[in-house]
Image (spheres, helix red, strand yellow):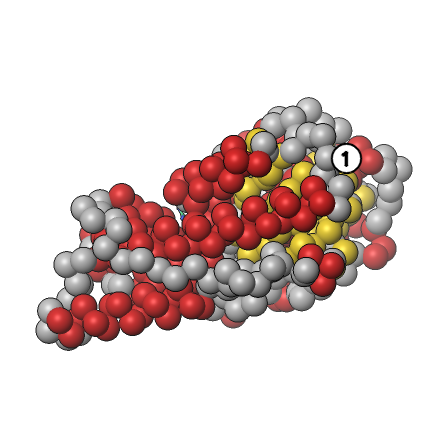
């Protein structure tokens, strides 16, 4: 079978055609990053307008690259939740329009489920597995028991890691350095950290060490960066545009703190899943979402995996950030499970949807 995937939940308009064997036939991605850099974040009004401008082109380009006519598509998968309401609406309206015009089934997709499941397009990972999803808007751990059976183990009590890394990068003025001027905040921090000559100079306190669940918290790490930056700026008499000389070491300390925290919570989730017999024989962890592109964070999860006997997988970095491929793939997984499903009528946008069955309270002990 052939599925067209449409993703518009945030600031990227992504489309792709994927077949039942998991081959990517054609893809298009209209990224709004550069436009948003000037605002220091995502502007929902602009995101909405750009999706509207790009959605037609994006679908056309994906089909063209795949050399597939829309009449030969079996279904249209579209992100319906969670995300920015108006952005989601652009994708869903367009999917409905195509569906009416060409008489195609629509498969509604949960954006975070798609981030997790797309790993199965590249690797043979059986259910159940543990998913760590870290991105610009989310930080969560889930046990994935089936295509449509997610158990939410924990999420963030404050900010998402990508959001915090973007804010910290901006506060550090990393984009004023030419080598990072066009780079995502999290990636700029990763690159700067690699240049550290004394990576242990700043030791960040590990968040939530005493809390025995799978929650995340990144605001403490962000505040600690702010405190150290202020101290060093005063010490070096920097006002306005200057960058502290210890910047690479500070990035290294911060990144280490973020990675340690994420690894620590993931280990807790693994222990819980084993204790509750949610995960038994084959032990696998999938790491996905934009922050999963970070090799330092990924390697920290691998250390936990080795310690606990888990294989750790991530989709190719390009597929960790938002894209249409994961939406098309999720559509195919749903089609395989329920070949005759026709869900045309209950396609609704839900901007604030949670992920799966919420068992966060059971995780506490
Ligand atoms: P969500 O999936 O929660 O809706 P989103 O769709 O905005 O969020 P993604 O596109 O999955 O997020 O990821 C974007 C985030 O990934 C940005 O915050 C960016 O800084 C971060 N990111 C990208 N590359 C890296 C990297 N190498 N290290 C750390 N963070 C990174
Ligand atoms: Fe995303």
Compared across the picture, whether 33 is left or right of 312 comes to left
Most foreground residue, 123 or 224: 224
- Which residue: 39% across, 42% down? 296
- Which residue: 86% across, 45% down? 342
Most foreground residue, 118 or 159: 159
Q: Position of residue 159 (x, y in %)?
A: 50, 66
Q: Residues within 10 Å of mark 1 (few under 14, many from 20)?
A: some
Q: Is 219 above or below relative to 19? A: below
Q: Position of residue 81 (x, y in %)?
A: 68, 58
- Which residue: 85% across, 35% down? 339
Q: Position of residue 249 (x, y in %)?
A: 23, 53
Compared across the picture, whether 319 is left or right of 259 comes to right
Say which residue label 1 marks. Answer: 74
- Asked whether residue 26 is in view, the answer is no
- Asked whether residue 228 is in view, the answer is yes
Q: Quadrant of the N terminus?
A: top right
- Which residue: 69% across, 42% down? 274
Compared across the picture, whether 309 is left or right of 348 comes to left
Most foreground residue, 109 or 307: 307
Q: Quadrant of the C terminus?
A: bottom right
Q: Position of residue 350 (x, y in %)?
A: 71, 64
- Examine the image and state in which quarter residue 295 appears: top left
Residue that protrudes farthest toward the left in the picture: 237
């Amino acid at each position: 079978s052939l599925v067209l995937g449409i993703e518009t939940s945030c600031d990227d308009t992504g489309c792709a055609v994927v077949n039942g064997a998991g081959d990517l036939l054609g893809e298009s991605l209209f990224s709004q990053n550069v436009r948003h850099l000037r605002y220091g974040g995502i502007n929902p009004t602009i995101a909405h307008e750009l999706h509207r401008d790009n959605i037609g082109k994006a679908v056309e380009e994906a089909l063209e690259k795949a050399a597939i006519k829309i009449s030969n598509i079996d279904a249209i998968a579209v992100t319906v939740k969670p995300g920015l309401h108006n952005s989601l609406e652009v994708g869903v309206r367009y999917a409905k329009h195509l569906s009416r015009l060409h008489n195609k089934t629509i498969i509604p997709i949960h954006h975070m489920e798609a981030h997790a499941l797309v790993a199965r397009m590249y690797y043979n990972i059986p259910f159940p597995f543990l998913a760590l999803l870290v991105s610009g808007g989310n930080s969560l751990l889930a046990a994935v028991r089936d295509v449509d059976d997610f158990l939410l183990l924990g999420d963030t009590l404050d900010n998402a890691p990508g959001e915090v890394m973007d804010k910290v990068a901006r506060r550090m003025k990393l984009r004023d350095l030419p080598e990072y001027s066009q780079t995502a905040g999290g990636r700029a921090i990763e690159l700067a950290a690699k240049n550290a000559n004394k990576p242990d100079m700043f030791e960040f306190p590990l968040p939530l060490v005493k809390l025995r669940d799978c929650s995340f918290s990144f605001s403490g790490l962000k505040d600690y960066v702010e405190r150290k930056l202020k101290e060093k700026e005063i010490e070096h008499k920097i006002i306005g545009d200057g960058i502290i000389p210890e910047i690479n070491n500070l990035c290294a300390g911060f990144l280490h703190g973020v990675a340690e925290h994420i690894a620590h919570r993931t280990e807790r989730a693994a222990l819980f899943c084993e204790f509750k017999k949610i995960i038994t024989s084959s032990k696998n962890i999938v790491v996905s979402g934009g922050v999963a592109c970070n090799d330092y964070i990924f390697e920290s999860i691998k250390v936990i995996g080795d310690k606990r006997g888990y294989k750790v997988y991530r989709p190719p970095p390009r597929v960790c950030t938002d894209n249409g491929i994961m939406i098309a793939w999720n559509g195919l997984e749903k089609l395989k499970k329920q070949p005759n499903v026709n869900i045309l009528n209950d396609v609704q946008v839900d901007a604030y949807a949670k992920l799966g069955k919420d068992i966060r309270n059971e995780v506490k002990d």
